[in-house]
């Protein structure tokens, strides 16, 4: 089956509407599978569910917003890769900032 090709502006508009940013994709996944495993801490072996992770992300994002994080701010993250790093990155993006690690 063939469909008519979209013009360049139509194609750009359609693809822009379907773009899911990483933090948006995370929150969507957390809503659809809250009890599924999300992160595993390699040092402790503890598994964090999407619900647990999302609660940490939203809490830190609120703190970042209260501290002035918005669309024109870059949040620097300096830590070893870990679940807390992932939470920090997602929180900065959820708060509206950009991430520099």
Image (cartoon, rainbow, N blue to C red):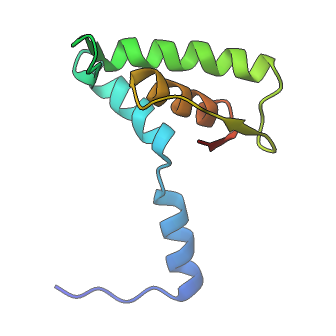
Is 85 situated left or right of 82 in this image?
Answer: right
Residue 94 or residue 19, whichever sits in front = 94
Residue at 41% across, 34% down: 26
In the depicted structure, whether residue 101 falls above or below residue 8: above
Residue 44 or residue 37, whichever sits in front = 44
Residue 99 or residue 19, whichever sits in front = 99
Image location of residue 89, percent across then percent down: 54, 33
To which quarter of the image does residue 37 belong? top left
To which quarter of the image does residue 1 belong? bottom left
In the depicted structure, whether residue 2 falls above or below residue 54: below
Residue farthest toward the left in the current orientation of the protein: 1
Image location of residue 41, percent across then percent down: 29, 19
Residue at 53% across, 28% down: 79
To which quarter of the image does residue 13 belong? bottom right
Is 7 situated left or right of 69 in this image?
Answer: left
Image location of residue 47, percent across then percent down: 24, 14
Image location of residue 78, percent across then percent down: 59, 32
In the depicted structure, whether residue 97 falls above or below residue 41: below
Quarter of the image that includes the C terminus: top right
Is 9 situated left or right of 22 in this image?
Answer: right
* Circle count: 0
Residue 9 or residue 78, whichever sits in front = 78
């Amino acid at each position: 089956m063939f469909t008519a090709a979209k013009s360049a502006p139509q194609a750009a508009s359609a693809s822009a509407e379907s773009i899911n940013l990483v933090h948006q994709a995370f929150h969507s996944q957390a809503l659809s599978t809250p009890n599924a495993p999300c992160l595993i801490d390699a040092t402790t072996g503890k598994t964090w569910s999407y619900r647990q992770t999302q609660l940490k992300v939203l809490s830190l994002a609120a703190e970042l917003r209260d501290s002035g994080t918005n669309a024109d701010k870059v949040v620097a993250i300096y830590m070893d890769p870990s679940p807390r790093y992932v939470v920090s990155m997602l929180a900065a993006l959820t708060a509206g900032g950009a991430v520099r690690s």
